Image: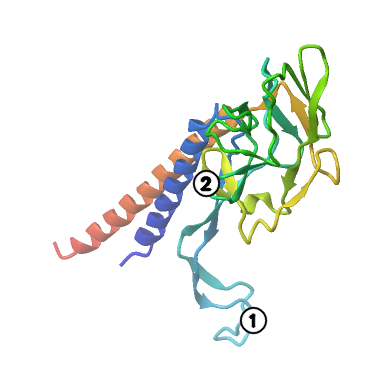
Amino acid sequence: MIRSLWTAATGMQAQQIDQDVVANNLANVSTIGFKKSRANFQDLMYQVYATAGALSAAGTALPTGMEIGMGSRPAGTQKIFSQGDYVGTANQFDWAIEGDGFFQVDDGNGNTVYTRAGNFRPNKDGLVVNQDGLQLIPSITIDPKTVTFTLQKDGTWTASDSTGTVISTGRLEIAQFINPSGLNSLGRNLYGKTDGSGDPVVGYPNSDSRGTVSQYNLEQSNVSVIDEMVKMITGQRAYEINSKAIQTADNMLSIINNLKR
């Protein structure tokens, strides 16, 4: 059987996964705090017929070997945590992290999960929560008399009443990971810790290489539509050329089958 049939098939499968990743990136081009993904691939094992440096029939060393590849396979998808663009808002509970770090929220089961989406709101009890109602960690409780909420770049926050009197104050903490690409994507703009990401290092913004916090701003998705469209086109062409390789191998087999005729 012609080997190129199976080799080209692996190429088509790889490009299909790449297109799935590109499609997900494009679908989240307007998602607050979204980080794009990239599909990584590896070549498969090689069939070795001759090793470079082996002796030929004449007793001389072969300058090159003979190796035939067996195609490609997906090695994983990697989150790219480059900074997204910022958009200004008029909401005092819209925050953006400028630099490295993640907001911490409780998933409702006592577990801490992480997010770059800073579109928070006070709930009916005055607790600051995200758009799914998950409570910010450490918790911030807004007094009903609060009129002005001020968040500094270092995470220090102050709640004041209509007269400007300070009602409560505190300091926000954010988490940092040595390998954020190893975080588990949970959906809903949330990430979970894994052995690959390492343990979170929690501290105040603008300290120990952590980013600062910007109030009245939201971080947009870091997806570039132009880049993703280029990837889509090149992936489509690669998928097409692999299908052509399968068709060519099939034609060659057809010629062999018809030799007797």
Q: Quadrant of residue 104?
A: top right
Q: Which mark is residue 186?
A: 2
Q: Are marks 1 and 2 in contact (CB under 8 Å)?
A: no
Q: Residues within 10 Å of mark 1 (few under 14, many from 20)?
A: few
In the image, what residue occupies the spot 52% across and 36% down?
Answer: 25
Residue 130 vertical placement versus 52 (above, below): above
Q: Quadrant of residue 116?
A: top right
Q: Residue furthest top?
A: 163
Q: Position of residue 127 (x, y in %)?
A: 63, 32
Q: Nearer the viewer, residue 21 or 248?
A: 21
Residue 119 visible from this viewpoint: no
Amino acid carrying mark 2 in the image: Leu
Q: Nearer the viewer, residue 61 or 164?
A: 164
In the image, what residue occupies the spot 76% across and 41% down?
Answer: 173
Residue 210 vertical placement versus 90 (above, below): below
Q: Which residue position is annotated with label 1?
A: 61
Residue 245 vertical placement versus 166 (above, below): below
Residue 66 visible from this viewpoint: yes
Query: Disc 1 and disc 2: Cα gap in Å?
Result: 55 Å
Left or right of 85 in this view: 231: left
Counting residues from the N terminus, which is met first, the one under dot 1 or under dot 2?
1
Q: Position of residue 236 (x, y in %)?
A: 44, 39
In the image, what residue occupies the spot 42% across and 45% down?
Answer: 239
Residue 38 vertical placement versus 129 (above, below): below
SS for dot 2: strand
Q: Quadrant of residue 41?
A: bottom right
Q: Position of residue 165 (x, y in %)?
A: 83, 18
Q: Position of residue 172 (x, y in %)?
A: 76, 37
Closest to the camera, between mark 1 and mark 2, is 2
Amino acid carrying mark 1 in the image: Ala
SS for dot 1: loop
